[in-house]
């Protein structure tokens, strides 16, 4: 186990185990939480279900040190709060969170307000669009996913756009691509391993 992965398990207070070879994860297993890992460059994030949403914990390497970052999601596709060394960023949505039937509705949007360290900053809109079904493979296991375009537009700021591949069975995003204003790919987060995590 790498130093970063060991540090992450200490941060989370969890015991991590990979499924037996040839056995792919299912919804009953991931209810305890999952760890997604990319080896090069190293990136690891732990998701744990929390009602209709989930919590996220990860270690980010900055200035040659590891810094914890945590987040809460109202739905696996919709972040509500992110806490890091730079402070707390929180998004408030005016509309009800109804994303489980996104393939039928095709679109969801809401007026959105950003709060930084508890103080109102700027407002705008969040737009989430269903683009179709697909398949993602991690370590020889394939999972059906939604292809989703997620766009956050806040006044005076460039749009934040992601193409996400979300497994409705596992209730986690398995791959994401950051897009520029003209929908050109800027960066991609693809994982090499998907493991079960058991909370204390």
Image (spheres, rainbow, N blue to C red):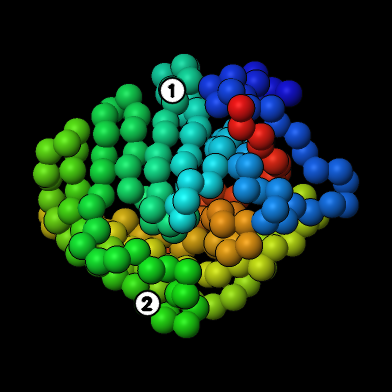
Depicted 5 relative to depicted 154: above or below: above
* Mark toward the viewer: 1 or 2: 2
Query: How dense is the environment of label 2, judged by Cα within 10 Å: few (below 14), some, or many (20 and up)?
Result: some
Q: Position of residue 72 (x, y in %)?
A: 40, 43
Q: Residue at x 32, y 42 (%)?
A: 81
Q: Position of residue 55 (x, y in %)?
A: 46, 42
Q: Which is nearer the eye, 152 or 73?
A: 73
Q: Position of residue 147 (x, y in %)?
A: 53, 70
* Label 1 to label 2: alpha-carbon separation: 35 Å
Residue 8 visible to an observer of this rendering: no
Q: Earlier in the sequence, mark 1 or mark 2?
A: 1
The label shown at residue 107 is: 2
Q: Residue at x 45, y 74 (%)?
A: 102
Residue 101 visible to an observer of this rendering: yes
Q: Which is nearer the eye, 28 or 120?
A: 28
Q: Quadrant of residue 63?
A: top left
Locate residue 143 relative to residue 50 in the image: left or right.
right
Query: How dense is the environment of label 1, judged by Cα within 10 Å: few (below 14), some, or many (20 and up)?
Result: few
The label shown at residue 67 is: 1
The local secondary structure at tag 1 comes to strand
Depicted 67 relative to depicted 186: above or below: above
Locate residue 164 relative to residue 15 in the image: left or right.
left
């Amino acid at each position: 186990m790498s130093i970063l992965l060991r540090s992450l398990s200490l941060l989370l207070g969890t015991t991590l185990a990979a499924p037996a070879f040839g056995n792919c994860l299912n919804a009953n297993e991931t209810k305890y939480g999952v760890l997604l890992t990319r080896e090069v460059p190293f990136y690891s994030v732990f998701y744990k279900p929390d009602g209709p949403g989930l919590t996220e914990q990860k270690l980010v390497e900055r200035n040659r040190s590891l810094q914890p970052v945590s987040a809460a999601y109202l739905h696996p596709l919709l972040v509500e709060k992110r806490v890091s060394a730079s402070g707390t960023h929180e998004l408030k949505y005016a509309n009800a969170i109804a994303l489980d039937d996104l393939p039928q509705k095709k679109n969801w949007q809401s007026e959105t307000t950003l709060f930084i360290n508890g103080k109102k900053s700027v407002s705008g809109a969040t737009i989430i669009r269903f683009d179709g079904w697909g398949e993602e493979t991690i370590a020889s296991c394939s999972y059906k996913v939604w292809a989703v375009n997620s766009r956050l537009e806040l006044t005076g700021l460039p749009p934040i756009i992601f193409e996400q591949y979300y497994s409705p069975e596992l209730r986690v995003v398995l791959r994401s691509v950051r897009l520029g204003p003209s929908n050109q790919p800027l960066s991609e987060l693809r994982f090499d391993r998907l493991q079960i995590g058991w909370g204390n």
